[in-house]
Image: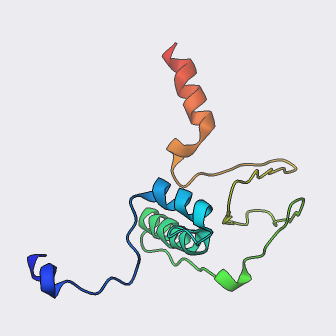
Amino acid sequence: MEQYTGKNAPAEKIPRVNGHAWDWIEAIRTGRQAGSNFDYGGPLTQVALLGLIAIRFPGQTLKWDDKAMKRYTAGGHTMAPKDMAHFASIKGETIVEVTGIGPFAIKYVDPNDDPMMKKTAAANAK
């Protein structure tokens, strides 16, 4: 990395910040856009999560159609056919209510993320 320091350093294209919290507060105070805004962070998170899913399912073809994603406003709803795998991308603080007519299951990519598993583990530890 030494060859990229001093006079050989690349030009700064992205403004440097003093951390995420500072950047967020400065964006509020000055009205400028934060460097870690959701328009950038949302798609970046989608790519990272899709990569994690690909690691979990090696050798399987994953189909991703970003253009087919639909936007739902507050109170919006959708229906999914039986056994349909789906993905949700959320911007900002959100409450998502999922209901179904049985049998109904939520399968976590990482089972450790399932809050019911944590409750079961805590109950078994007693």
- Number of dots carrying numbers: 0
Residue 55 in picture, x, y percent from top left: 42, 66
- Give how far across and how far down residue 9 sits, in percent: 19, 83
Given residues 8 and 105, the one toward you in this image is: 8
The residue under the point 49% across, 61% down is 23
Residue 87, percent from left and from top = 66, 66
Residue 108, relative to residue 51: is it above or below? Answer: above
Which quadrant of the figure has residue 79?
A: bottom right
Query: Relative to 13, is 111 on the left or the right?
Result: right
* Left or right, residue 53 beside residue 91: left
Residue found farthest to the left: 2
Residue sitting farthest toward the top:
126
Q: Residue, x 80% and y 50% (percent of image)?
A: 97
| Left or right placement of residue 98 versus residue 52 in this view | right
Residue occupying image coordinates x 57% and y 19%:
123
Question: Percent position (x, y) of residue 26?
Answer: 53, 61
Between 68 and 14, the residue placed more toward the observer is 14
Q: Nearer the viewer, residue 39 or 121?
A: 39
Residue drawn 33% across the image and 82% down it: 12
Q: How is the image coloured?
A: rainbow
Is the residue 91 above or below the residue 40 in the image? above
Quarter holding the N terminus? Answer: bottom left
* Depth order, front residue of 124/88: 88
